[in-house]
Image (tube, rainbow, N blue to C red):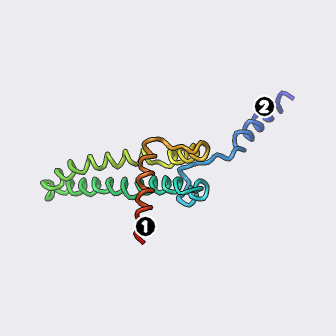
Amino acid sequence: MNKILPFVLLFTLSYSVYSQDKVKPRKMSYSDFTKDFGVNDTASVVIDLFFDKKDNGAYGEMLFLPITVGLAAIPQTKAIGIPLTLISAPLFLHGCYILIKYRKGKLYKVLSNYKRSKELPKWLQKKVDKQLGLYKVVDREY
């Protein structure tokens, strides 16, 4: 009996831990977020805002540093490459900051909270209101 008890405890513990289906936001795509959380215009704007900032803003800013570092590594272009590297380093850091600020885990938390309480954080509410206002202006022009 003493030999079987550790195996039974190990099995029940592993079964209880791994039986939960945890959501991994970093593996969710745009369509997963819209399917699960796109209940109204506000949630759709939040999803669009997060993905747009991350895909267009952050990656675009981070693209310049590897190019300028490559230019600085070539001996003939050091006079141009080093100043360009110094200029593009703050852009790279800002792109890193945007990637952290608009990550999928944070989007999942914001949308879960919004689905439960119908409230957004103040910093995000301002951006959503501005974007919804732009959508209304575009609708009126047609």
- Asked whether, in this view, residue 111 is left or right of residue 141, the answer is right
Mark 2: secondary structure: helix
Name the front one of labels 1 and 2.
Answer: 1
Rendered location of residue 112, percent (x, y): 58, 45
Residue closest to the eye, 41 or 71: 41
Query: Which amino acid type corresponds to the residue marked 1 in the rendered image?
Result: Arg
Q: Residues within 10 Å of mark 2 (few under 14, many from 20)?
A: few
Up the image or down, 70 lies above or below 141; here it is above
Q: CA distance from mark 1 to mark 2?
A: 69 Å
- Asked whether, in this view, residue 41 is left or right of residue 69, the answer is right
Quadrant where the image shows the C terminus = bottom left
Rendered location of residue 8, percent (x, y): 80, 35
Rendered location of residue 12, percent (x, y): 77, 37
| Residue that label 2 marks | 6
| Residue that label 1 marks | 140
- Could you say which quadrant of the image residue 123 lies in? top left
* Residue at the outermost right position: 1
Rendered location of residue 130, percent (x, y): 41, 53
Image point (55%, 53%), residue name: 27
Mark 1: secondary structure: helix
For marks 1 and 2 on the same chain, the one whose residue lies earlier in the sequence:
2
Image point (68%, 47%), residue name: 21
